[in-house]
Image: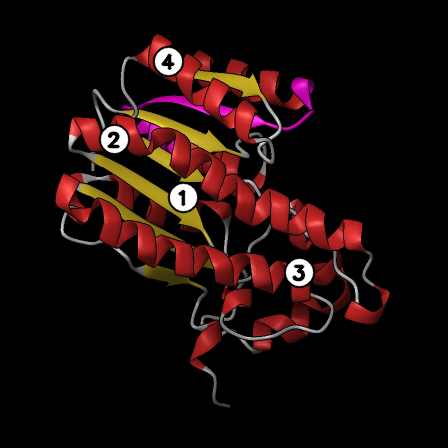
Amino acid sequence: MKLAGKTALVTGGSRGIGRSVVETLAAAGAAVTFVYQSNAQAADAVVAELKAKGYDVSAVQADVRNKGAADQVVEQFLEARQKVDILVNNAGIIRDSLLIQMSEEQWRDVIDTNLNSVYNFCHAVYRPMMSARSGRIINMSSVAAHFGNKGQANYAASKGGIEGFTRCLAKELASRGVTVNAVAPGFIETDMTQAVRNAAEAEIKKSIPLRRMGRPDDIAQAVLFLASDAASYITGQILTVDGGLTLGGF
């Protein structure tokens, strides 16, 4: 699956799944710009490493929760790249707490970062993609949207919202040749899941039919597929990549 001549914008691209997505899309030939929140040193390191491999990669700092910032990022992206072929909404955080102990700030931080950022960037690319009559939007959901975890009401709500949003937007843009899909990862080896893995990795693996944690590249390859011409007849779908975790049973 090659993306030569394509441009891609990825939010939350400096670490974990996002970084793997950036590298995978760039390796496939896309010109990639990723958005990072605050760690310029980490972002610069990613850019330097991937440019050393000959990839066309750049980074921009922005608060994905801010609609004006998202509009500006897309405007600058279009000035530099002339078009936006692929948008990957990957930015996400967790602020786990039982609801009785969850502050309004914890609730809003997760909803704003995980869900509202998807609206912000999809709204910003809507007209350019519609005018071009082509485009790929891939949103990052989670298996948390499919089943409940204690202490993750905010996170599960944000990811469930992403899935409903994805289906609606897919219907809106289908007639213009734009596909909108989501990827729902299971337990992936990232900084975000480190605490859970430290506490119960052996037990978690027992619940996964493939008996291993996922790797960021497992998710990046799913994103690559949905971004490619091979997925041109797929829209409004949630691709679960979880090693069989959500199959249930014993």
Relative to residue 226, is residue 165 depicted above or below?
below
Measure the C-alpha gap from mark 3 to mark 2.
31 Å
Whether residue 246 is visible here, answered yes or no, is yes
| Residue located at (29% from left, 59% from top) | 237
The circle on residue 182 is none
Q: Secondary structure at mark 3?
A: helix
Q: Amino acid at mark 3?
A: Asn
Earlier-in-chain disc, 4 versus 1: 4
Measure the C-alpha gap from mark 1 to mark 3.
25 Å
Cβ–Cβ under 8 Å for marks 4 and 2: no
Residue designated by label 3:
154
Q: Amino acid at mark 2?
A: Met
Earlier-in-chain disc, 3 versus 4: 4
Q: Secondary structure at mark 1?
A: helix
Measure the C-alpha gap from mark 2 to mark 1.
22 Å
Q: Which residues are magenta?
A: 23-41
Q: Amino acid at mark 1?
A: Ala
Q: Secondary structure at mark 2?
A: helix
Q: Residues within 10 Å of mark 1 (few under 14, many from 20)?
A: many
Measure the C-alpha gap from mark 3 to mark 4.
40 Å
The circle on residue 220 is 1
Cβ–Cβ under 8 Å for marks 3 and 2: no
Earlier-in-chain disc, 4 versus 2: 4
